[in-house]
Amino acid sequence: MKNERNKNDRTELLYETDGGLTDFEAVVIESLVSDETKEPCIVLDRTAFFPEGGGQPSDVGSIVLQSGETVRVTDVRTVDGCVCHFIEKKVEAGEKITGHVDAARRLRMMQDHGAEHLVCGLIHNEFGYDNVGFHMSEKEVVVDVSGPLTDEQIRMIEERANAVVYSNVPVTISFPSPEEAASMEYRSKLDVSENVRLVTIEGVDTCACCAPHVSFTGQLGVIKILSFMPHRGGTRMTVVAGLDAYADYVMLHDSNAKIMDVLSSPRDDTGSAVSEQMERYMALKEENTALRKEMAEMVASSVLERIRTMDPGEKSCVIFTASLDQIGLRNVVNRCTAEFDGYVCAFSGDNSGYRYIFAVSPDMEKSADLRGFTKEFNEITGGRGGGSALMTTGQTPAGRDEIQNCVDKLCKKA
Ligand SMILES: [Zn+2]
């Protein structure tokens, strides 16, 4: 079997056989401008830049011209069978260049992509599932397989994948002829036997693929399946490896350190510490609700006491409380309007601002409309809010004295 078919019609594709090569020399054989974006682009006689393909984003990087000038390569795509390098400025045909692929980004892509091959290969061997979807981003790979997987199965696959990493087995590239391909077993999303390029992880998996790959599994680094969920009868997984797994570890470490700091919990048991705090919080919340209810009852009783001793001609009942929530305030107001034929104006807060409910008894529906009352109150005190003829709600930044004066004035007018 040939292990060299690293050339399309015009360009020698260096990335096909050497994923580790990121610096190379080449000649510009055509200089073009994109019809679509009007960006300049060039075709080279040979390239280590991988064009976008098979779910993997393109390489980026730069080229250095004979003059020493550096020009950024922003995107690489296969257009009409040609590998087109999109660059910042026009470069003429005949120019000799040195190409530099962004090596860190290439390594990240190869690590995540290689991990995907390894994980899917192991799942295929163990459960017979196929890879039915694949998407790579800058920091992870999302992959769909055709069958369901449990927590234990995912953990087992992850452990086996990492064991293959530490065995450091070779990853090889080959180009079987159509006859050879027809008699071989390999995983492939497409049913093709021509121009097949196979990526083999020794002893584990053979898969048709167009992207650059590492030469040994040790270069993949640690592999972690970050999450998985049922998806269209199969399983969708998010996988990271190597540099991206390290970045994920640093993120989790920092996040864990914050929890350790706040809860004074041991490094390996922040989960229990958070659960404990959550239980305490729920108990306090319940207690708080009961206390607020009790407080609303007490406020209501004392206001009703006041209402019963009021002059019969009194038009308003103003209530100030420090910490009733909206529900408590509404309960107090409802109890009052049942016994008082006038404006009930209830406020909860402190001198930095109050929430309010204004209400009248349903018997006053014809004689009073709170919307005008509330509009004027808001204008005078800088508040906002509104509602129906019988009840309005809102808030105001005004202090207690200012509010009391305003309500007295408006009630006199009403
Ligand atoms: Zn692949």
Image (spheres, rainbow, N blue to C red):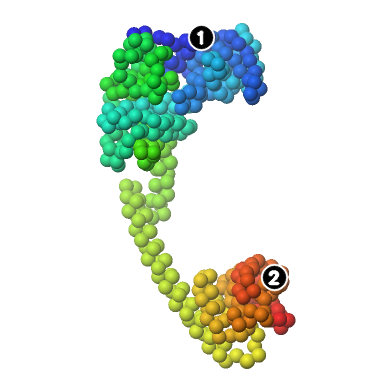
Q: Position of residue 174 (x, y in %)?
A: 36, 13
Mark 1 element type: loop
Which residue occupies the foreground of this view, 233 or 324?
233
Q: Is mark 2 within 8 Å of ligand 1?
A: no
Q: Is residue 125 above or below residue 405?
A: above
Which quarter of the rendering shows the N terminus? top left
Disc nearer the start of the sequence (2/1): 1
Q: Is residue 15 above or below residue 402?
A: above
On the question of residue 248 being in view, the answer is yes
Q: Is residue 126 left or right of residue 294?
A: left
Alpha carbon distance from label 2 to label 1: 78 Å
Relative vertical location of residue 380 with respect to residue 178 in this rendering, above or below:
below
Q: Left or right of 413: which side holds 2?
A: left
Q: Can you identify the residue that label 2 sits on?
A: 375
Q: Quadrant of residue 362?
A: bottom right
Q: Is residue 196 above or below residue 223?
A: above
